[in-house]
Image (cartoon, grey):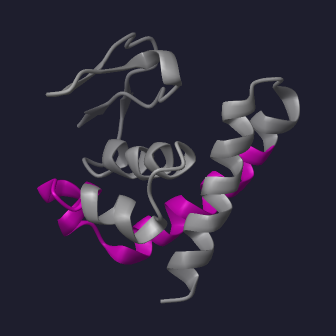
Amino acid sequence: MLTHSDWTPDNVLVSPDRAWLIDWAWPTLGAAWTDPACWVLRLMASGGHTAHEAERQASRLPAFQAADPAHIDLFAAANIRLWDEIAQASTSAWTIKMAQAAKSWAACRQAR
């Protein structure tokens, strides 16, 4: 499956009725649940969702709902390292929020 994989704030346009992913500069082959999992992090980083709430939203998509929980656990853990490295090299506040969301999500998944 083709995934977007570049979930920066400028690449998601949101209206009252829907959202669009734009700027497909980094299309990547991956599991169908990958983009919904990235969405979990964005929802958490925006400050509007807990890990459970964000996963509930992602679970509205069949690919995320059917994903092997162990694979999502690994994805969440890998995102800690990814976003920590990005946040250390960036001056953008949103990258720090993404790093914090990744840590929170992985901790929530480990607690299950």
Residue 75 among those drawn in magenta:
yes
Q: Quadrant of residue 57?
A: bottom left
Against 24, residue 64 (above or below) is below
Whole-percent x, y for residue 92 in the image: 75, 24
Main SS, magenta region, reads: helix
Q: Which residue extends farthest right? A: 88
Whole-percent x, y for residue 101 in the image: 61, 55
Whole-percent x, y for residue 102 in the image: 62, 56
Lateral position of residue 108 relative to residue 35, left or right: right
Lateral position of residue 35 relative to residue 48, left or right: left
Taking the spot 43% from the left edge, 17% from the top edge, the residue there is 11
Taking the spot 59% from the left edge, 69% from the top edge, the residue there is 106
Whole-percent x, y for residue 78 in the image: 62, 57
Q: Quadrant of residue 28?
A: top left
Against 26, residue 112 (above or below) is below
Taking the spot 32% from the left edge, 48% from the top edge, the residue there is 36
Against 43, residue 57 (above or below) is below
- Which of the image's four quarters has the N terminus? top left
Residue 63 among those drawn in magenta:
yes
Taking the spot 40% from the left edge, 71% from the top edge, the residue there is 52
Q: Which residues are magenta?
A: 58-84
